[in-house]
Image (cartoon, rainbow, N blue to C red):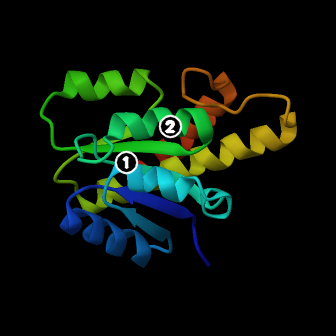
Amino acid sequence: MTHGTILVVDDNPDIRETTRMTLSRQGYEVWLAPDGNSAMQLLNEPVLASEVCAVICDLAMPNGNGTDLIAYLHRHHPAVSIIVCSGTDDTTFLQGILQQGVGDWIRKPMSRDTLLQKVRTAVHLFTLRTQQDSENGPSHTSVASPRTASPSALETVQDYHNKTTDQ
């Protein structure tokens, strides 16, 4: 049984493969893309796109950076959770991307436990968003960012986050 499909987008093949192995061992299906353009091509395939519940992406990549991919995801796949994985030391910048609707961020190099905790939370958030969409019907927009989520949905995500980090 799979816990969800995660798309890992990074120009470093070692990071892609290590992340794939870590998540696969925990029951996730993992797809890999070397850059933002490749990721967008994968997500343009409706059958493939319908499977992805979270994207882990680097920001600085050739052939389509993470910022372009994030904008694409917000426009075309707003329920998909986004985790930025970056080597930058600029925590102010990383905190700022949360205001742009990115679900979370991980600083490289990342620990296995941090990766798994953030992915669990992202998949849970995706599940809440898709449940909300199905309950509200197609005429309502999906929850594209924590800023637009209902307080009860945010509390549920925070409770889940606290529960998974307390273990």
Label 2: element kind? helix
Q: How far from the left and from the top, in percent, is residue 92?
A: 22, 21
Label 1: element kind? helix
What numbered label is drawn on residue 36? 1
What residue do we see at 28% from left, 71% from top? 17
Marks 1 and 2, the one that precedes in the sequence? 1
The answer to whether 19 appears left or right of 83 in the picture is: left
Q: How far from the left and from the top, in percent, is residue 30?
A: 45, 69
Closer-to-camera residue (97/34): 34
What residue do we see at 54% from left, 64% from top? 5
- The residue wearing badge 2 is 72
Binning the other alpha carbons within 10 Å of mark 1 as few (below 14), some (14 to 19) or many (20 upward) gives many
Indicate the quadrant where residue 16 lies. Answer: bottom left
Q: Is residue 90 above or below residue 40?
A: above
Closer-to-camera residue (158/122): 122
Q: Amino acid at mark 2?
A: Tyr
Q: Quadrant of the C terminus?
A: bottom left
Q: How far from the left and from the top, in percent, is residue 129?
A: 68, 40
Q: Amino acid at mark 1?
A: Gly
The answer for how far apart the CA atoms under marks 1 and 2 are is 9 Å
Q: How many marks?
A: 2
The answer to whether residue 167 shows anywhere in this view is no
The answer to whether residue 111 shows anywhere in this view is yes
What numbered label is drawn on residue 23? none
What residue do we see at 32% from left, 53% from top? 35
